[in-house]
Image: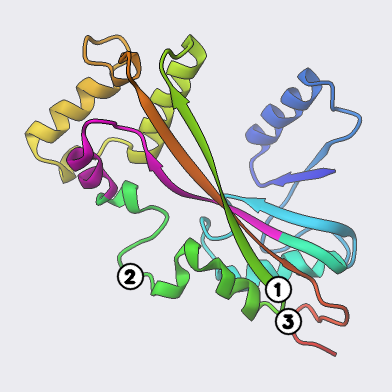
Amino acid sequence: MIGLDSSAELLAVAEESVRRWGAGDRVSFRRGDAKDLPFEADTFDWVWSADCVGFIPGEPVELVREMARVARPGGTVALLLWSSQQLLPGYPFLEARLNGTRAGAAPATADWPPERHPLRALGWLSRAGLRGPAARTFVTDVHAPLAEDQRAAVTSLLEMRWGNPEAELSAEDWRLYQRLRDRDGPESIVDGEDYFGFFTYTLFWGIVQRGQTPEGELI
């Protein structure tokens, strides 16, 4: 298995992680660009992207075609994409307003056409020439009591998902959001005895057709 990323820092973290898990002899890493994968055609049985295609700049159909280029005919191309969350139980209106901020809508921007949205990835796979596009959503949930590492992970997830949207919230909402995500404060939401939250990832996949060109055409 080969992992690819454009960041040397993240690759170093990944290499340390697989060494710690004892998988260093089965997983290797290379630095590279999703737009121009550093592999020959027909190299892999499967190629997958996690929060990359659809999240980084670039035409997603072209990126899928590049993934299909390095997969063997009959192989699988898959896209794993963040799709939803419910992380502030008891505060549905605040969470809805946070989801309406620029960070909450990310990676979408106001000028994106509808077909550019990640949850339209079935269309990307079809236009890239892949056979039988399909999708499935997976749910991960967390609930009280949370261990310390879980508390840290959920708090980090709140910050990752919504950032610091002070300019896009009312002063009251901003203060409430700060109190809820303050792990050491009395209103820390992750310390609630009835805390429950979940997030979902959606996996989209399709099969590389035999005779497919890098442009997604059949020969």
* Label annotation for residue 86: none
Identified at 39% across, 31% down, the residue is 197
Left or right of 118 in this view: 52? right
Kind of element beneath mark 3: loop
* Label annotation for residue 215: 3
Q: How far is mark 2 from mark 1, CA to CA?
A: 30 Å
Identified at 72% across, 63% down, the residue is 36
User: Closer to the camera: disc 1 or disc 3?
Assistant: 1
Check residue 162 for magenta coloring. no
Check residue 80 for magenta coloring. yes
User: Where does the image place residue 169, in percent across and percent down from the top left?
Assistant: 15, 42
Q: Amino acid at mark 2?
A: Asp
Neighbourhood count class around disc 1 (C-alpha, 10 Å): few under 14, some 14–19, many 20 upward? few
Kind of element beneath mark 2: loop
Q: Amino acid at mark 3?
A: Glu
Left or right of 182 in this view: 33? right
* Label annotation for residue 132: 1
Q: Magenta residues?
A: 78-99
Q: How many numbered marks, from 0 up?
A: 3
